[in-house]
């Protein structure tokens, strides 16, 4: 019994320390050991594995393992790794997992991510996945992504991981201008993740990479919002309109578009931009509607439109080539209502311990899709070069409900609050803060008396820092 209580107290202290670190400084506290796993299919070059191990060493990883298996066996290997971490008994500061497989074979990476997210030892801790594709016949030497990441991890350990990755994406764009793909990251992190030896309460480091998008040209925004039958949606429209005006965006608004109107408005928006006389430096598109069971958007007529099709429409805009394109999606992506991860038994005991509240089950994950070798293959969900410079922010995790009440949605209202308070900040970092605040909320759905959790998903192929105000 004493052992059980001691273990419970250690877990409670670890989670409380993480929560306090995020709340006070917006950074993860990685005081526990950092562990890593390289899981590769047969045939991956020894030099690629060596570069990965060099990255782990630069990030001060205390323990790492390498396992080799067919892609079909990856899930079982990760289950064994999760059980090993849970049996460890002590807190873990962070985990890094590199999955290396032939291009196109990692067809359901979310199953692998979710397997490790179930790990009790990692509750509230950051989980980083490098999903690396290798092409048959590619050069055995590590590609630009791994080489640049290894160099920056050793030279700039005080940068946050998102800053490091943005700089890596920038280098790939500059060195391989003819590349047919671009790396993509998916983040539900709740704070800055610095994996070097920097003390989380220490002085702020030199801020991020020097490369930054030039926003001296025109800024344009398109807001498409279904108001009918969506309580509080008008408040979101008003808040977002005011923010766009304050940030200098020339803004167009359409309310209650049908599914066809969603597509037509994006097509007309692209044509208008291509015909614009002066340079366009940035575009923002907000899509606010009910969502379908598979993440579709529902127009005011109840018909479906795929948000990815709307993104593709703007990604081929000539005027926005090399320019940042921001998409905000306030819509459900399924019907799952997340109860979060937290103690369920002995609730009175956890209240007595003043344990932190439940954490959304999809939070604290960073996924990076990139090439392991060369610069011409494509990762499992990596974008083509036309998909570069895109930032998409979903109000809910995949398969989950996005919450809204008569005052507006948690996502849009928090976003406006954070950006108005610090309009000069790096947008990826500001969105991470938005996610932290949304994750802290306990929400009640319209058809449930049980409190639920929400979590954003941020997808980025940005290749420079993006600050909306100089």
Image (cartoon, rainbow, N blue to C red):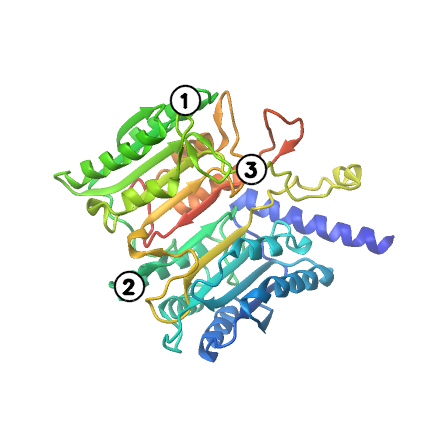
Work out which residue is located at the far front of the displayed protein and give it.
303
Residue drawn where x is 33% and y is 40% of the image = 310
Q: Earlier in the sequence, mark 3 or mark 2?
A: 2
Using the numbered discs, state the Cα–Cα distance from disc 1 to disc 2 in whole angstroms.
42 Å
Residue carrying label 2: 179
Numbered tag placed on residue 150 in the rendering: none
Q: Label 1's element?
A: loop
Tags 1 and 3 touching, CB below 8 Å: no
Residue 361: % across, % down: 60, 45
For label 3, count other residues whose C-alpha is less than 10 Å away and answer few (under 14), some (14-19) or many (20+): many
Q: Label 3's element?
A: loop
Left or right of 247 in this view: 8: right
Left or right of 335 in this view: 158: left
Q: Nearer the viewer, residue 259 or 377?
A: 259
For label 1, count other residues whose C-alpha is less than 10 Å away and answer few (under 14), some (14-19) or many (20+): many
Q: Label 2's element?
A: loop
Q: Earlier in the sequence, mark 1 or mark 2?
A: 2
Residue carrying label 3: 454
Question: Which quadrant, please, contains the C terminus?
Answer: top left
Residue 230: % across, % down: 46, 22
Residue carrying label 1: 227
Residue 358 sits above or below residue 42 on the image: above
Which image quarter: residue 326?
top left
For label 2, count other residues whose C-alpha is less than 10 Å away and answer few (under 14), some (14-19) or many (20+): some
Residue drawn where x is 31% and y is 41% of the image = 468
């Amino acid at each position: 019994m004493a052992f059980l209580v001691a273990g419970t107290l250690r877990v409670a202290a670890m989670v409380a320390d993480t929560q306090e670190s995020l709340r006070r400084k917006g950074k993860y506290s990685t005081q526990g050991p950092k562990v890593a796993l390289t899981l590769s299919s047969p045939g991956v070059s020894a030099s690629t594995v060596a570069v990965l191990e060099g990255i782990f060493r630069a990030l001060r990883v205390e323990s790492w393992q390498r396992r080799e298996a067919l892609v079909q066996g990856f899930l079982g290997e990760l289950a064994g790794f999760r059980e090993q971490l849970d049996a460890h008994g002590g807190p873990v500061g962070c985990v890094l997992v590199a999955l290396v497989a032939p291009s196109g074979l990692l067809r359901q990476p979310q199953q692998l991510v979710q397997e490790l997210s179930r790990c009790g030892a990692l509750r509230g801790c950051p989980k980083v996945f490098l999903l690396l594709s290798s092409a048959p016949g590619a050069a055995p030497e590590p590609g630009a992504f791994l080489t640049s990441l290894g160099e920056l991890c050793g030279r700039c350990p005080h940068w946050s991981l998102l800053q490091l990755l943005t700089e890596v994406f920038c280098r790939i764009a500059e060195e391989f201008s003819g590349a047919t793909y671009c790396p993509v990251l998916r983040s539900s992190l709740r704070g800055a993740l610095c994996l070097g030896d920097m003390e989380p309460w220490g002085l702020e480091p030199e801020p991020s990479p020097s490369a930054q998008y030039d926003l001296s040209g025109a800024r344009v925004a398109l807001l498409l919002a279904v108001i009918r039958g969506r309580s509080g949606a008008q408040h979101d429209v008003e808040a977002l309109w005011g923010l766009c005006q304050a940030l200098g965006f020339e803004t167009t608004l359409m309310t209650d578009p049908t599914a066809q109107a969603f597509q037509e408005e994006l097509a007309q928006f692209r044509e208008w931009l291509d015909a614009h006389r002066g340079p366009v430096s940035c575009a923002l598109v907000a899509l606010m509607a009910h969502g379908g069971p598979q993440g579709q958007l529902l127009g005011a007529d109840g018909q479906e439109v795929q948000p990815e099709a709307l993104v593709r429409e703007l990604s081929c805009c000539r005027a926005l080539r090399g320019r940042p394109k921001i998409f905000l999606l306030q819509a459900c992506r399924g019907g799952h209502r997340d109860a979060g991860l937290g103690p369920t038994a002995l609730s009175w005991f956890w209240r007595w311990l003043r344990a932190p509240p439940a954490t959304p089950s999809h939070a604290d994950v960073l996924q990076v899709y990139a090439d392991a070798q060369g610069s011409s293959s494509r990762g499992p969900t990596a974008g083509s070069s036309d998909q570069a410079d895109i930032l998409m922010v979903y109000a809910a995790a995949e398969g989950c409900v996005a919450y809204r009440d008569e005052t507006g949605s948690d996502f849009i209202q928090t976003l406006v609050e954070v950006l108005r308070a610090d309009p000069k900040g790096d947008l990826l970092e500001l969105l991470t803060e938005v996610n932290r605040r949304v994750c802290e909320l306990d929400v009640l759905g319209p058809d449930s008396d049980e409190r639920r959790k929400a979590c954003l998903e941020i997808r980025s192929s940005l290749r420079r820092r993006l600050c909306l105000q100089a």
